Amino acid sequence: MKQKIHPEYQQVTVTCACGNSFHTRSTMCKDIRVEICSACHPFYTGKQKFVDTAGRVEKFQRKYGGEYFKRTKK
Ligand SMILES: [Zn+2]
């Protein structure tokens, strides 16, 4: 049997855009930054999330020149 073919799980710190951070285990072996976590996700908070979703959609539209939305819209 070969040794060390399985990735080692390491504890990493996940830091969210809302400021919340928590520990998880990952093979990435480095800290992770996320924009949504269980503390600020509207599914868990039941509140409107503060992150600029509209701005991100605009960014996406600029990047793809609106083609994605034209294609998916009927
Ligand atoms: Zn969060």
Image (cartoon, rainbow, N blue to C red):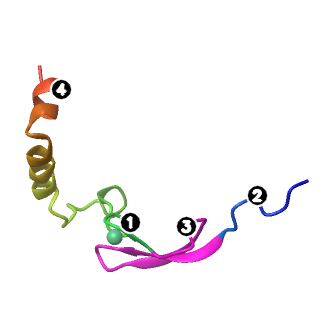
Task: Look at discs 1 and 3 and give the one toward the viewer.
Answer: 3
Magenta segment boundaries in residue numbering: 10-31
Q: Is residue 72 above or below residue 56?
A: above
User: Label 2 crowding class (10 Å Cα cut-off): few <14, some 14-19, many 20+?
Assistant: few
| The residue at label 1 has a CB less than 8 Å from ligand 1 | yes
User: Label 3 crowding class (10 Å Cα cut-off): few <14, some 14-19, many 20+?
Assistant: few
Write down which quadrant ligand 1 falls in.
bottom left
Task: Look at discs 2 and 1 and give the one toward the viewer.
Answer: 2
- Using the numbered discs, state the Cα–Cα distance from disc 2 to disc 4 in whole angstroms: 42 Å
User: Label 4 crowding class (10 Å Cα cut-off): few <14, some 14-19, many 20+?
Assistant: few
Residue 48, how many percent across, how many down?
Answer: 20, 60
Residue 28: image tag: 3
Helix or strand or loop: what does disc 1 sit on? loop
Q: Of all residues shown, which one is farthest toward the top? A: 74
What residue is pinned by disc 2? Answer: 5
Helix or strand or loop: what does disc 4 sit on? helix
- Residue 49, by quadrant, is bottom left
- Residue 71, by quadrant, is top left
What residue is pinned by disc 1? Answer: 37
Q: Tell which of 63 and 11 is nearer to you.
A: 63
User: Which residue is painted at 8% across and 37% down in the image?
Assistant: 66
Q: Earlier in the sequence, mark 2 or mark 4?
A: 2
